[in-house]
Amino acid sequence: MENAYAFSGNTFTYSMPRMFRELGYQVNAFHMNKAEYYSRGVNYKSWGYDHYFGLMDIVEDSGYELELDRQLVQNETFYKNMFPKEGNFVDYIITYSLHMPFNTQEKVGKLLAEMKYKDGKIPNLSEEEVAYLQAGEADYMVGLLIQALKDNGLYDNTVLVCYADHYLFTMDKNVLSKYKDINSNMVNHTPFFIWSSDMKYEQIKKPNMQIDILPTVLNLFGIPYDSRHYIGADILSDTHPGYIFFQDGSWYDGKLYVKDGKVVSGGKADENYLEQTGKLASDTIRKNDLSLKSDYFFQK
């Protein structure tokens, strides 16, 4: 996450939650797991969130029902904090149900299969079919979320920013190959969309990365920030570089996929272009790694 916000003539580098908090927003994070898991309770507070809510901290029973995304909206405590009665707010909601394993013998797959096939006769479902079943649970949660926005008079005053953090890397490669190129980093192609009730549909085909999400959202909200301090760029702007990089140094510009300075797919390219973009990719990767390893964000 990247950005800066100017105060009293000085520029302070802020994470997304701090940026919105300075504008008077309530900023909370919601997830299924306890605050101690991945030290989320500590980490999210240090990043600027007002609170981290873990459903397993609130509900004593940690059985299967706490592995369904619908619980994130249906739980009374979560619901009250997700949809405050006064003021503006940002909710960071982390879904849970679309995780491995994709079978009907354990965890989410088992629970959803038992709910769907109530007669106790669960068919022999493939890994792919169970993955779709679990994705359906995430879809159901989004439906509950949208209905809750309507019920609270927030539907026409809310923006949803939805993205996947990674592809289904535990999925059988034979299944994945039906949908993706599994022989390169292009397998990392994942969903990302922004929605509000007054937006017209538009598909952006320009390559982009997760680090581009925050600048894009801030510009859509009209929030000032110093783009020089951050790695990503507004996807909708003319200055967006239009390429993505991967940790091994390979990159993709919408046509060419290049690794180790050689074009793997997409056709031919000028050597100068390959050299310059390759250097840009390696420099960006280095900056990204340094921002993760050092105390990049700080408070006033």
Image (cartoon, rainbow, N blue to C red):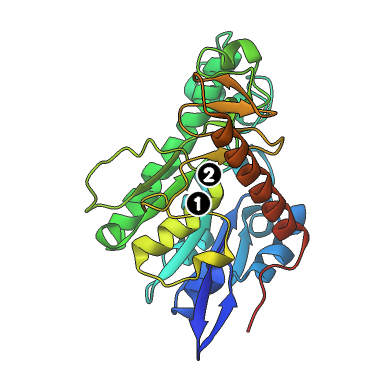
Q: Are marks 1 and 2 in contact (CB under 8 Å)?
A: yes
Residue with the mark numbered 1: 212
User: Callout 2 environment at 10 Å: few (<14), some (14 to 19), or many (20+)?
Assistant: some
Mark 1, secondary structure of its residue: helix
Considering only vertical position in the picture, is 267 above or below 74?
A: above
Q: Return the residue nearer the eye: 271 or 249.
A: 271
Residue in front for this viewpoint, 157 or 110: 157
Amino acid type, mark 2? Met
Whether residue 216 is situated above or below residue 143 in the rendered picture: below
Could you tell me how many numbered marks the image carries? 2
Q: Residues within 10 Å of mark 1 (few under 14, many from 20)?
A: many
- SS state under label 2: loop
Identified at 45% across, 46% down, the residue is: 162
Residue 129: image location, x then y, percent: 52, 16
The residue that mark 2 highlights is 209
Please say whether residue 162 is visible from this viewpoint: yes
